[in-house]
Image (tube, coloured by chain):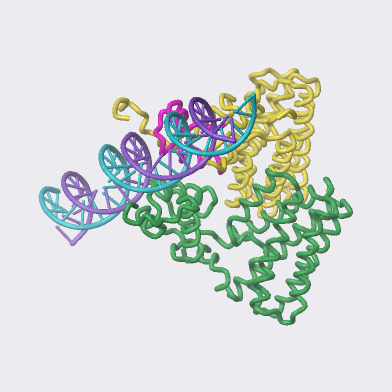
Chain colours: A yellow, B green, C cyan, D purple
Amino acid sequence: MKAVPEVDRSVSQTVKAQLALRDQILAGSLRPGERISELQAVETTGASRTPVRMALVRLEEEGLLEAIPSGGFMVKAFSERDISDSIELRGTLEGLAARFAAERGVSARELEPLKECLAAIDELLRQVPISIEAFSSYVTLNARFHALLTELSRSPPLIRQIDRASALPFASPSGFVMAQSALPEAQQILIIGQEHHRVVIDAIENREGARAEAIMREHARLAVRNLRLALRNRTHLDLLPALALIKTATD
Amino acid sequence: MKAVPEVDRSVSQTVKAQLALRDQILAGSLRPGERISELQAVETTGASRTPVRMALVRLEEEGLLEAIPSGGFMVKAFSERDISDSIELRGTLEGLAARFAAERGVSARELEPLKECLAAIDELLRQVPISIEAFSSYVTLNARFHALLTELSRSPPLIRQIDRASALPFASPSGFVMAQSALPEAQQILIIGQEHHRVVIDAIENREGARAEAIMREHARLAVRNLRLALRNRTHLDLLPALALIKTATD
DNA sequence: GTCCCCGCTATTGTATACATAACGAATACA
DNA sequence: TGTATTCGTTATGTATACAATAGCGGGGAC
């Protein structure tokens, strides 16, 4: 773009395009099943066709896009079951991570950040009812907790796989907990989830691999029940724009 | 390439380049840690730089390549633990698939191909000792069995994830079973693995999810033990060129 | 009136040219 | 003699031009 030399060179065009496109998909401005026009993507992202195409390939591998046999890509649509399976899948992987952490042992220093997360979340949950702002903090802290827990496994292949599984935003159990904020059960669900976190830390400290794994899987099952509840009640779905990717029964 | 118009148009240049590069990596002509030169890849694959770059991005997402911060890609190196973790990871995912299959139920017709696989493998295992050719058939059949089992889960996200986990060739439990062919224990290991297959089918038929899952994880643990044995004995490693990706302790 | 075929257009796949950044070598200075 | 700086070369990142294909619309024929 010689006419627009003030492009941001601090980040590669490919990455810029990838982030921009992902935002568009998750924000719902590109609807599921819709074919993505490269030309249009070039206009909206500001990058040229080559980096846009690289970004499209990455997003396809990430699972947000689907290749069209005749060429090009479309936004992937997900069924409700796809989503609950993704949550359970992630829970299973995180269970394995917790088991690895417990079996391989972690130092007290490594557990420190986890415990800080735990304490911060406890603080937030003391509010009854919890505010939207506190929810936002909660979601961030919860994601951090799960990421730290994953790291404890010290297994690059597993961490990589969990990252992949987390790329689909609705695969994160915490998301649907958040969606429940307006329901009477919401606070209780958050507290149960927090209890799970406490148990998994304890299990890892005591090197009880099986227990650490089991509790993470239970955690995911809670999230699945939660998802069902959220979809049935259509509660705070606007907080989760990624739900735009769910194909309805009529599709 | 105007000078060479007889390029094969039946398959896209991108796919061609991807397959060619993967072959080179797995065959060991590109060594772990080695930077991949795009120009060189252009020459060896016959595609031009754009499809080569797309292929490189795909292979990176696949986990065979690693991006170099300063630019470009290098062949990824794996530790022995990375590999055993990958096997256990895959076993965990296949366990989940088996559980899904059992819980959701599968028809007798769907199980038919699995049972055919089982019978064919039984036939091969009747040879004592088993020939190299029979081993080759065994590996194919075994891969087919695992793929069919995965499909039974009827969960696209899970199937996708298992495919990803299987992209690294050494993540396949069967591979290391094969590597054992020269050891006295080899036949016994194959038979135990086959017994696992039989049990998982039985569990799925009887809709025992927990048992189906447990046996697949046990199956993976067998493969891990197997890997250790194979690496210690350096047995038939030439049958598994992908082992070139393992970084030695001196690296 | 309907169906089929031909041609046009739009979009993707591929190739290549250009810009830029990184790595290395060589020279000069301390 | 060693180190640092600068210049040159090479390879990657980006942009754009070209080619080919698929989809669509119009026109003609049955």
Can you tell which quarter of the image residue A49 is in?
top left
The secondary structure that most of the magenta stretch takes on is helix
* Percent coordinates x, y for residue B79 in the rendering: 55, 60
Q: Is residue B146 above or below residue B137?
A: above
Q: In which quarter of the image is residue B204?
A: bottom right
In the image, what residue occupies the spot 73% across and 56% down? Answer: B148
Instruction: Find out whether residue A48 is within the magenta segment.
Output: yes
Compared with A187, A165 (above or below) is below
Please check the rendered image and state whether residue B147 is part of the magenta-colored stretch, yes or no.
no
Q: Which residue is drawn at 75% across and 75% down?
A: B125
Give the side of residue B106 with respect to residue A43, left or right: right
User: Of A37 and A150, which appears nearest the observer?
Assistant: A37
| Residue A143 seen by the camera | no
Is residue A136 rendered to the left or right of residue D14? right
Residue located 76% across and 60% down the image? B218
The reply to whether residue B175 is visible in this rendering is yes
**Of residues A129 and B2, which is closer to you in this image?**
B2
Residue B75 percent coordinates (x, y): 46, 57
The foreground one among A248 and B195 is A248
Locate the C terminus of chain A by quadrant.
top right
Q: Give the range drawn in magenta.
A: A35-61
Viewed as shown, does residue B3 lie left or right of A44? Answer: left
Q: Is residue A249 left or right of residue C11?
A: right
The quadrant of the picture occupied by the N terminus of chain A is top left
Image coords of residue A175 (percent x, y):
68, 30
* Residue occupying the point 76% across, 64% down: B117
